[in-house]
Amino acid sequence: MSQKPLKVGLIGGSSGFITLAHQRAIFMDGTRRITAAALSSDPEKAIQASKYWPYPIQGYASYDEMLQGELGKSPEDRVDYVLIQTPNHAHFDPAKKFLEAGIPVFCEKPLTLNRNESEILCRIVKEKRIPFCVAHTYLGHWTTRLARHIVRSGLLGNIRWVDCAYLQSWMALRSNSPGFKENTWRLNKKISGISNCGGDIGTHALMQLRFITGLEIESLSAHLETFFKWNEHEEDNLDDHFTAYCKLNNGGKALIRATQIAVGHKNDLRIEVNGEKGSLRWAQEDSEKLIIHPIGKTERIYYRGQDDASDDFIGQLPTELANEQTIPWGHSEGFHDAFARLHRSFEEDVRAHKTRNYMEADGSKYATVEDGLAGIHFIEKAVESNQSDNAWVKL
């Protein structure tokens, strides 16, 4: 029996590639549609942007107005969840208000500006038992989920070392462009938070490590570096290069690094996991492929959805992985498909919440509010370490 499409409300995102990616992801399955939006912090711009939307939606001057307007409708007519795609400093307030009103939230990362705000959101989510997703895109790749299955099934044995990196060059390439500093909100500490590079892409590297391995960081020593000095006040310059050496809770070690000044790299998120029985390698720019090096066996390369994924190493694919195919293997998936898989997984929980059958998300399909808190805690401790001459600090 077909179901009515879920109604999605947008907060922020009048332009930008992330906005377009979310739009495609929402529409990809035909089971979700955008019906309402508060597209800008400028009320006039918000209304105008909604008028020129490619299809009819209800435009609101602000997210407060949107909340009141949607609550004034019947439960069947109001939005089923909201997507927050504002700059970092404007995540907390709308998330808190919509959660308190009982409306599920899908929020861009990092979750908030600080740990206190994140803990408040965690408490509301727990008290109200309401779905909440943090948009860590790359968890949506099918091969990321296969990697999780392999590592967490013990096929690589005890994990000794994890190297997770997110390497970009955009800041180095654009640094001399006119108005770059003034027009890049990520360089503004009041908007971006205490870390630019670490908060923006370092948290993605952290989530790949945690999602795939199931391991947590017990302590770290971090270096946050600024190669492009934007402000005459040294303390106001945010990092464009981030490195954290970590001790894991199983006794293993890890390196989490991120940079925006590595010329030659585009959107190069990658992870290597070294275990007692073998190693695993995955890279976002070649996301259809997962490479395994088992000790005593030949190298294995797995592709999304291949028919012969059952073998003497991996065994039979678990049902949840086998059933996650959207298109036959050989037809490449990518960034937009990963986004769609997150929205698809979140949709399942939102529908369960509407029928009061929702079971608290366990983080196996998308990053939860608790994962968002873990990311903020990680960044705060990295900054603390960096300010203490890279001393080891416990998480």
Image: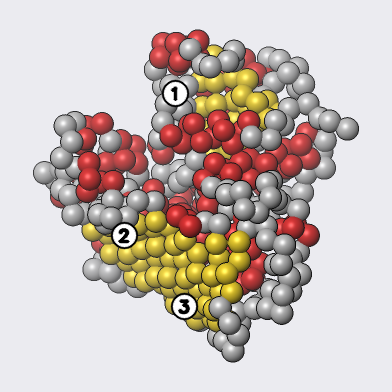
Q: Amino acid at mark 2?
A: Phe
Q: Earlier in the sequence, mark 2 or mark 3?
A: 3
Q: Earlier in the sequence, mark 3 or mark 1?
A: 1
Q: Secondary structure at mark 1?
A: loop
Residue 270 is at least partly visible in this image: yes
Please name the residue that numbered disc 2 is placed on.
Answer: 242
Verify CB contact (< 8 Å) between mark 2 and mark 1. no
* Residue at mark 2 to residue at mark 1: CA–CA distance: 30 Å
Work out which residue is located at the far bottom of the displayed protein and give it: 296
Number of dots carrying numbers: 3
Say whether residue 155 is left or right of residue 272.
Answer: right
Q: Amino acid at mark 1?
A: Ser
Verify CB contact (< 8 Å) between mark 3 and mark 1. no
For the rendered model, the colour scheme is secondary structure
Q: Secondary structure at mark 3?
A: strand
Quadrant (top left, top right, bottom left, bottom right) of the N terminus? top right
Residue at horizontal 19 percent and vertical 31 percent from the top: 179
Q: Secondary structure at mark 2?
A: strand
* Residue at mark 2 to residue at mark 3: CA–CA distance: 19 Å
Res. 17 image quadrant? top left
Residue 247: percent from the left, percent from the top? 44, 75
Q: Amino acid at mark 3?
A: Trp
Residue 366, above or below 49:
below
Say whether residue 305 is left or right of residue 136.
Answer: right
Residue at horizontal 16 percent and vertical 32 percent from the top: 178
Please name the residue that numbered disc 3 is placed on.
Answer: 161
Please name the residue that numbered disc 1 is placed on.
Answer: 14
Q: Nearer the viewer, mark 2 or mark 1?
A: 1
Work out which residue is located at the far left of the displayed protein and give it: 232
Residue 338: percent from the left, percent from the top? 57, 47
Nearer to the camera, 134 or 175: 175
Say whether residue 358 is left or right of residue 369.
Answer: right
